[in-house]
Image: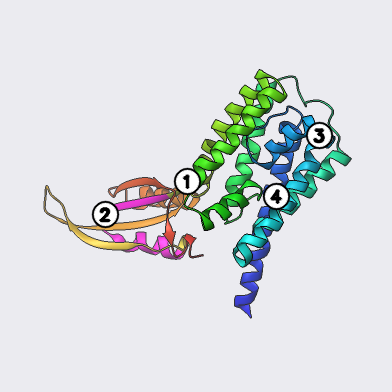
Amino acid sequence: MYKNMGKVKRTLEEYAILTVATLILVVGVYVFKFPNNFSFGGVTGIAVVLSAIMPATPGNITFIINMALLVVGFIFLGKSFGIRTVYVSVLMSVGLSLAEVWFPMEHPLTTQPVLELMYAIVLPAFSAAIMFNIGASGGGTDIIAMILKKYTKLNIGGALFLVDLGIVIASCFVFDAQTGLCSLCGLLAKSLVVDNVIESINLCKYFTIICNDPEPICDFITNELHRSATIYKAEGAYEHNQKTIIITIMKRSQAVELRNYIRIHQPTAFIAITNSSEIIGKGFRGFN
């Protein structure tokens, strides 16, 4: 019973995070991307270009394309099609359509296109990083990538980049050179922001502690920080005296506590702290 309750709690937490991330995505796209005609990739980029030559709003075009891609995804991917991706895709599409009804924007929020470009890049990229980190995506062209990955041997990243680049080039002809160049900058910066945000979210601290008395440190790690550690014996190269090496990994906030504890209680201990964003194992990514 308690195990099932734990699963339900984790599921609710995940969907709460997905909801917040999707709302951030909607704000970034609707407030900063649509009014400036920024069209750097994805379904929203296609919608921006098509809305200039069709009698439909970007939000409605996004809704139509996303719903069509969801149907295609269910046809070609079946049960492997992630329910979280469906949830995000539907919520984003509905959110953009409702925003156009409730908060119509006839012009950009400011008169600074570069400032708005920054927000149009950072907010959706931050949202996408949160989604990717818990195994979801915003749907859209990600669905095409999933289908290509399943049925072909194409370089998916390269293929999607070429599609996005084509959208950017189209924006130069549909709008103007400034909009096209801004969209190109957005396309180039988007992946960098996503990668950096994901790395920051997953960042952990890897401790190598060389000391004479390991027991108090290990007790603090296990009892106070609720982490584990690995210890092994070593010999100093200069004086050939016996040392103990403690290896442990933890989140950044816990790392500060451990570092301060060692400084106060064992100031002679040698500590090497390394950043790592790819920790896979019990208590960390993949085994929680």
User: Which numbered disc flags the more N-terminal residue, 2 or 3?
Assistant: 3
Quickly name the residue at label 2. 211
Query: Which is more N-terminal, label 2 or label 1?
Result: 1
Residue named by callout 1: 155
Report x, y in % for residue 259.
40, 48
- Residue closer to the observer: 180 or 285: 180
Task: Give the label, 1 or 2, closer to the camera.
Answer: 1
For badge 4, the amino acid type reads Val
User: Compared with residue 103, is residue 256 higher up or lower down, i.e. above or below?
Assistant: below
Q: Residue, x 88% and y 41% (percent of image)?
A: 101
The residue located at (54%, 31%) in the rendering is 188
The residue segment tinted magenta is 205-223
Q: Residues within 10 Å of mark 3 (few under 14, many from 20)?
A: few
Q: Is residue 30 magenta?
A: no
In front: 154, or 193?
Answer: 154
Q: Which mark is residue 54?
A: 3
| Element type where label 1 sits in the image | loop
Residue tagged 4: 20
Q: Which mark is residue 58?
A: none
**Mark 4 vs mark 2, CA separation in Å:** 44 Å
For marks 3 and 1 on the same chain, the one whose residue lies earlier in the sequence: 3
Q: Secondary structure at mark 2?
A: strand
Q: Secondary structure at mark 3?
A: loop
Dividing the picture into quadrants, the one containing residue 146 is bottom right
Q: CA distance from mark 2 to mark 3?
A: 70 Å
Gap between marks 4 and 3 measured at Cα: 31 Å
